[in-house]
Amino acid sequence: MRKIVVASLVFLGSVFLLQLRDCFAADKLGYVDLTKVFTEYQKTKDYDKVLTQKEESFNAEREKKLAEIKQLQDKLNLLSEKEKEAKKGELDAKTKDLQEFDRQKTMDLRKEHDEKMKEILQDIDEAIKEVAKKEGYSFIFNDRFLLYQAKEFDLTDKVMSVLVTKAASAQSATKKK
């Protein structure tokens, strides 16, 4: 009985694989190294520079606020108890201001980062779709999900070329305005 079940499963599996092979035989397949496309995309590099500048500006402003708090704390240590009580409110206000500043700037940077990443990933997605349509690909995979990739199916350079072309045409359109 087991031999019949095993034989049936082998037969059905073989039929399924043959049909699957026939199904994919007519389709063009490819893959893209999304990590490479993302990191080499000029828009990503440009945004990284902007983000770094914003983070440096944020850190400089934060350090300035911290220095003010430290200076106020140092002054408090030299004052009498009565004078300390009067200045404690100022210290608490500055500390609260710093916490709110940190929270707001972090939230703003995260929101901007998420929006920019969405925009960059949408550009990459559009470029992949353009390559697929232009060259008749039925399936384009992310290389990270493949256990093995033959180099001739790598479309990464073609996608990068589309992104470079679009960026150049967008830049020339901006210059004309």
Image (tube, grey):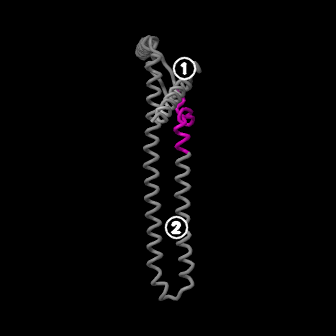
Which of marks 2 and 1 precedes in the sequence? 2
Using the image, determine if residue 24 lies above or below residue 177.
Answer: above
64 relative position to 21: left or right: right
Residue 67 percent coordinates (x, y): 56, 70
Residue at 56% x, 55% y is: 56
| Residue 34 falls inside the magenta stretch | yes
**Could you say which disc has been placed on residue 65 in the image?**
2
Query: Vertical placement of 22 versus 73: above or below?
Result: above
The one nearer the camera, 25 or 138, is 138
Taking the magenta stretch, the answer to whether it contains residue 95 is no
Quadrant, the C terminus:
top left
Name the residue: 50% across, 26% down. 162
Quadrant in the picture for residue 151: top right
Kind of residue sitting beneath label 1? Phe
What stretch of residues is rendered in magenta?
A: 32-48
> Residue 153 got which mark?
1
SS at badge 1: helix
Residue at 52 percent of width and 48 percent of height: 51
Secondary structure at numbered mark 2? helix
x, y percentage for residue 44? 53, 39
Relative vertical location of residue 144 with respect to residue 54 in this rendering, above or below: above
- Residue at horizontal 47%, vertical 22%? 131
Please provide percent x and percent y for residue 15.
42, 11
Looking at the rendered structure, the kind of residue marked 2 is: Lys
Counting from the top left corner in percent of width and height, residue 169 is at: 49, 29
Q: Residues within 10 Å of mark 1 (few under 14, many from 20)?
A: some
